[in-house]
Image (cartoon, grey):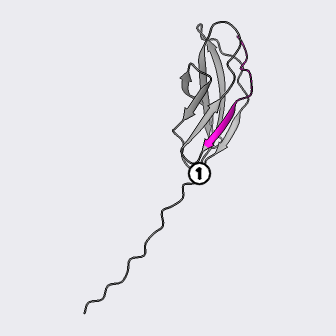
Amino acid sequence: MGRIGRPLSYAREPALYVRLAWQAARGSGIAGYDIHRAEDGGVAQVIEAVKSARFIDRNVLGGLRYTYHVMAYDSSGRHSPPSNSVTVEMPMPEAAPTRTPEATHAD
């Protein structure tokens, strides 16, 4: 089972999603990649299995921290060692300005 090549990298799109990319694993029989994610220091869990060496996580919330790593797997279900981990802190969305109701006076 080959190791994942170039370190896992990310691009954070402002409070919308996280884009992950890595170099494809080397070796024969690579069937895909499991994407692991931990939320705010929790336990990492598989959130998706993909065939290509990129993934977009659209299920993120502003104000939370996410840590990702990737593992390749082959058709027999064997996994590679995990890639490096990357941590992404999602910004809080900007709140819409609030309007103060104007007082009304009865004449």
The residue drawn where x is 55% and y is 22% is 49
Q: Can see residue 82?
A: yes
Q: Quadrant of the N terminus?
A: top right
The residue drawn where x is 60% and y is 7% is 76
* Residue 2, magenta (yes or no): yes
Residue 64, percent across and down?
Answer: 60, 47
The residue drawn where x is 62% and y is 42% is 12
* Residue 93, magenta (yes or no): no
Mark 1, Cα crowd under 10 Å, few <14 / some 14-19 / many 20+, is: few
Q: Can see residue 44?
A: no
Q: Which secondary structure dominates the residues rendered in magenta?
A: loop
Please tell me whether mark 1 sits on a helix, a strand or a loop.
loop
Query: What is the residue that sits farthest to the left in this orientation?
Result: 107
Residue 55, percent across and down?
Answer: 58, 29
Would you name the residue on which mark 1 appears? 63
The stretch in magenta equals 1-12
Between 28 and 65, the residue placed more toward the observer is 28
The residue drawn where x is 52% and y is 38% is 58
Residue 94, percent across and down?
Answer: 54, 58
Q: Is residue 41 above or below residue 55?
A: below
Residue 54 in the figure: left or right of residue 84: left
| Residue 3 quadrant | top right
Identify which amino acid the numbered label 1 is placed on: Gly
Query: What is the residue that sits farthest to the bottom in this orientation?
Result: 107
Between 54 and 37, the residue placed more toward the observer is 54
Q: Quadrant of the C terminus?
A: bottom left
Q: Is residue 13 above or below residue 98?
A: above
Count numbered badges in the picture: 1
Residue 42, percent across and down?
Answer: 63, 39
